[in-house]
Structure formats: structure tokens, C-alpha cells
Image (cartoon, helix red, strand yellow):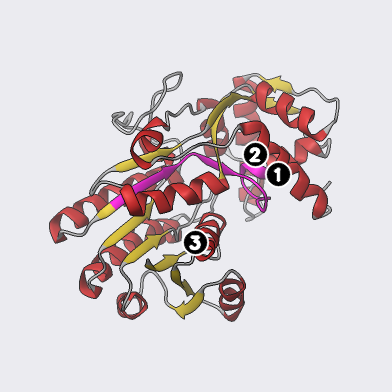
């Protein structure tokens, strides 16, 4: 492939760039800073200056490319102002599709999110699940609006777009988001969590799923990348076993968890600071997610890494980096 990656300085985009480079593909990546350019070069890519909301810059960046991996986006909770997240996730994604048409790109692999599935609590979500019609967070709403806008734009313009919807992406190199909670647990700083469940996909499986979607994905299709679904207790037990520690997690009742989210969120708003937890984060955690990633296995040939291997790789990386 002659591929362009947006968001290559992020966790998922960086993994996609790594796998493209390792496979010998000709890869360029959009950057917005000199530090980003250095990071892209270090991973085997060629940096090109462009912002996903700059149409002309995007067209120039896509010149001579046959495939675009659009992984740029904002993933955040408890944001004081979510307008930038919506602008990047929705408007930026539409701009990428329009630029792909004008640049003559053959295929766009769009990194959506498993949150767009919108399954009801206690059910298992698939690509055909009808969204529940209510949103757990501003992030979920932004990704649902973005995916719908991309699908409409692609249909209207005739652009070949394949949507990839990763579950919670975990693995070496991640210390933010939910990985921050896992790390806090391993360090003995977190002993109470809501009783819930989550679906995890290894970061390498996520990247390989994107490349497989470029090769085998059907036009207009969406593919969930979802490895293992675990409860909070199962996750803690598996992590503790891999790390060789003897600890137990205690579960919070939903009422206590919601109260904590409200109080902490309100306190940080008064201080005009971004809160580490807030009602939308607690609401998302309590809802939990269980997702079926078997379509990617059947149609893309993706094989998922066992969750214990993912956790082993994470713990080894944490130790190498001094996080433990």
C-alpha cells in the first residue's frame, strides 16, 4: 500500500503505523508539530504537515496515496468544553472523506469506536445492534454522530469507506484512560471499583484488524474489534496473577459510585479544573460493555490474542518503564 495515517502520534494510530512499516508498506502520516514529525520518522513513516480540519492540507497529504487510515480523534471524559472533541471527531472525519474523493484515494479505513454500537446494559453488542437511543457520554455522542456523518458522506460521494470499531484498546505503551485504573490497581492505589464488565482488544490485534480491513473489508461495512469480555473481579484477578501480587478488589455499589462521581465532578468544576472522575465516566463504567468481535474473525481473518498474554505484555512494559 501507499498509505496515509492520520492520528499516528496517538495510541491506536501509532500502532497502525508500526504495523504498516513492519509490513514494508510506503507510509506517510499527518503531523501538527516537530515533535510529532520526529515520532513518525522514528516509527518508519514520512511526516506530512496537515490538520484533519484543513481540507487543502489533507488533499496535499493524500496525493499519491491509495489508502487512508483515519485514526485521528479526541477521546475524553469530564471535559469542561466538548466542542473541540465534536469538531475533530465529526467535522474532521467528514473533511477526510471529502479530501479522499478529491485526491482519488481508493479506500478509507475509518477508526470509529465500539461505543457507537450502543447496546443496552446486560446485552451483547454486534455490528447490527440498534443503538439504544440515549448516550452515556459526550464522547459516545460525538463518535455516533461522526460514524453516521461519515457513512452518509461516503454514500453520497461514492467513497469506499470501511469502519473499524475497537473495544477498549489495551497493551504496552498505554497509561491513560482505563489503563490508568489498571495501573493504579497494580500499584496498590486502587482497591474499590464499580462492579461492571468491559470488552478489551489487544493493541496489536487492533492494528492488525485495521490492515486486514484494508485488504478484505467490504465497502460500507463496520467491524467490531473485540477480544475478551471480563468483569471487574475477573480483570483484577487476571492482572494480579500475571503480576504475581496478592490483592483483592472491592466493589462499590452503583449508588455510592454515582455519588462519588457527582461530588468529585462538582468540586473540580468549582475549581475550574478537569475532573479525574465525573457522572458521565461513572455512568459509562456502570453500564459496562460486552461486545462480539467474531465478524472480524470470519471476514477479516483476525485472530485475537488471549487476554492473559495482553496483560503479561502490559505488566512487563510497566516494569521496564519504571511504572511499578
Numbered circle sitting on residue 310:
2
Q: Which of pointers 1 and 3 indicates the residue nearer the eye?
A: 3
- Closer to the camera in the image, 218 or 123: 218
Mark 2 surroundings within 10 Å by alpha-carbon count, few (fewer than 14), some (14 through 19), many (20 or more)? many
Query: Which comes before the other along the chain, label 2 or label 3?
Result: 3
Task: Name the residue: 62% across, 21% down.
Answer: 195
Mark 3 surroundings within 10 Å by alpha-carbon count, few (fewer than 14), some (14 through 19), many (20 or more)? few
Q: Position of residue 305 (x, y in %)?
A: 57, 37
- Closer to the camera in the image, 73 or 223: 223
Q: Label 1 to label 3, Cα distance in Å?
A: 23 Å
Residue stretch in magenta: 162-180
Q: Determine if the magenta segment contains residue 174.
A: yes
Residue 24 versus residue 181 in the image, above or below: below
Q: Label 2 to label 3, Cα distance in Å?
A: 22 Å
Residue 133 versus residue 275 in the image, above or below: above
Q: Determine if the magenta segment contains residue 146.
A: no
Residue 207 as seen in the image, left or right of residue 294: right
Quadrant containing the N terminus in the rendered view: bottom left
Q: Which of pointers 2 and 3 indicates the residue nearer the eye?
A: 3
Mark 1 = which residue?
314
Q: Is residue 323 visible?
A: no
Task: Name the residue: 58% across, 23% down.
Answer: 196
Name which quarter of the figure residue 25 lies in.
bottom left
At numbered mark 3, what does the secondary structure look like: helix, strand or loop? loop
Q: Are marks 1 and 2 in contact (CB under 8 Å)?
A: yes
At numbered mark 2, what does the secondary structure look like: helix, strand or loop? helix
Q: Position of residue 257 (x, y in %)?
A: 63, 27
Numbered circle sitting on residue 23:
3
Amino acid at each position: 500500500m501507499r498509505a496515509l495515517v492520520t492520528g499516528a502520534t496517538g495510541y491506536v494510530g501509532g500502532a497502525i503505523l508500526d504495523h504498516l512499516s513492519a509490513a514494508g508498506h510506503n507510509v506517510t502520516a499527518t503531523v501538527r508539530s516537530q515533535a510529532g514529525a520526529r515520532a513518525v520518522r522514528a516509527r518508519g513513516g514520512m511526516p506530512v504537515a496537515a490538520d484533519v480540519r484543513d481540507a487543502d492540507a489533507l488533499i496535499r497529504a493524500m496525493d499519491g496515496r491509495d489508502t487512508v487510515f483515519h485514526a485521528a480523534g479526541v477521546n475524553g471524559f469530564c471535559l469542561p468544553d466538548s466542542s473541540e472533541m465534536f469538531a475533530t471527531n465529526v467535522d474532521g472525519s467528514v473533511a477526510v472523506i471529502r479530501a479522499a474523493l478529491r485526491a482519488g484515494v481508493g479506500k478509507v479505513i475509518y477508526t470509529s469506536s465500539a461505543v457507537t454500537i450502543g447496546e443496552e446494559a446486560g446485552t451483547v453488542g454486534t455490528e447490527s445492534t440498534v443503538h439504544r437511543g440515549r448516550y452515556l457520554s459526550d464522547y459516545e455522542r460525538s463518535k455516533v454522530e461522526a460514524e453516521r456523518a461519515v457513512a452518509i458522506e461516503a454514500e453520497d460521494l461514492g467513497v469506499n469507506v470501511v469502519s473499524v470499531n475497537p473495544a477498549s484498546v489495551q497493551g504496552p505503551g498505554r497509561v491513560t484512560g482505563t489503563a490508568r485504573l489498571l495501573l493504579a490497581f497494580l500499584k496498590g492505589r486502587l482497591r474499590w471499583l464499580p462492579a461492571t464488565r468491559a470488552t478489551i482488544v489487544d493493541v496489536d490485534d487492533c492494528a492488525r484488524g485495521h490492515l486486514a480491513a484494508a485488504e478484505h473489508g467490504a465497502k460500507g461495512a463496520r467491524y467490531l474489534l473485540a477480544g475478551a469480555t471480563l468483569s471487574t473481579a475477573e480483570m483484577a484477578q487476571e492482572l494480579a496473577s500475571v503480576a504475581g501480587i496478592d490483592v483483592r478488589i472491592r466493589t462499590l455499589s452503583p449508588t455510592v459510585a454515582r455519588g462519588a462521581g457527582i461530588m468529585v465532578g462538582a468540586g473540580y468544576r468549582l475549581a475550574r479544573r478537569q475532573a479525574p472522575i465525573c457522572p458521565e465516566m461513572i455512568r459509562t463504567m456502570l453500564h459496562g460493555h460486552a461486545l462480539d468481535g467474531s465478524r472480524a474473525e470470519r471476514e477479516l481473518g483476525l485472530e485475537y490474542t488471549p487476554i492473559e498474554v495482553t496483560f503479561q505484555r502490559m505488566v512487563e512494559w510497566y516494569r521496564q518503564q519504571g511504572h511499578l
